[in-house]
Image: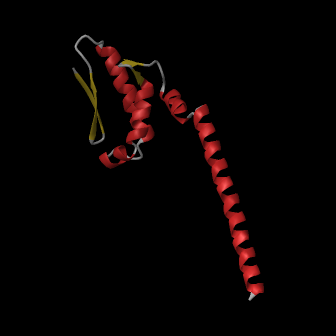
Amino acid sequence: RYVYQPIELLYLLVVTNKQSNILEDLETLRLLSKLVPEYAPSLYEEGVCKMAFELIFAFDEAISLGHKENVTVAQVKQYCEMESHEERLHKLLMQSKINETKDVMKRKASEIDKSKIEKNRGE
């Protein structure tokens, strides 16, 4: 069964089977139709395509294993904006590597400057 809702010039489509509850399907469709304007800057094809991954993540929070989650638009936004512990650790690790590389670069630059000065003294 196809359940759809127009959004500006686009259509939001939910594909279900005939045994699914049509009221739940319509409720899911309404939730998804509220999520699209929250994440897409414009409701035209280009705007939706630019935010495709964010929309997919939001839809994934709203629908899990083919079943609608009991969430609101605000909860979906909060879940999508949350940082995970692993992400925080990865960012800290990357920042420490960047800082270490900058320190090594400064040491190498000062060594090169010292060698140039010593070379100029020798001549």
Question: How many marks on residues?
Answer: 0
Q: With 80 as the anchor, is 40 left or right in this view?
A: left
Q: Please tell me whether residue 7 is drawn above or below residue 96 in the rendered image.
A: above
Please tell me which residue lies in front, 78 or 101: 101
Q: In this view of the protein, can residue 82 be seen by the observer?
A: yes
User: Quadrant where the C terminus lies?
Assistant: bottom right
Which residue: 72% across, 69% down? Answer: 111
Which residue: 29% across, 15% down? Answer: 22
Residue 90's spot in the image, x, y percent?
A: 59, 40
Res 30 quadrant in image: top left
Which residue: 44% across, 19% down? Answer: 69
Q: How is the image coloured?
A: secondary structure
Residue 65's spot in the image, x, y percent?
A: 38, 19
Q: Residue furthest bottom?
A: 123
User: Quadrant where the N terminus lies?
Assistant: top left
Q: In this view of the protein, can residue 37 be seen by the observer?
A: no
Q: With 91 as the anchor, is 31 left or right in this view?
A: left
Residue 23's spot in the image, x, y percent?
A: 32, 15
Q: With 30 as the anchor, is 89 left or right in this view?
A: right
Which residue: 37% across, 20% down? Answer: 27
Q: Please tell me whether residue 30 is drawn above or below residue 41 in the rendered image.
A: above
Res 81 quadrant in image: top right
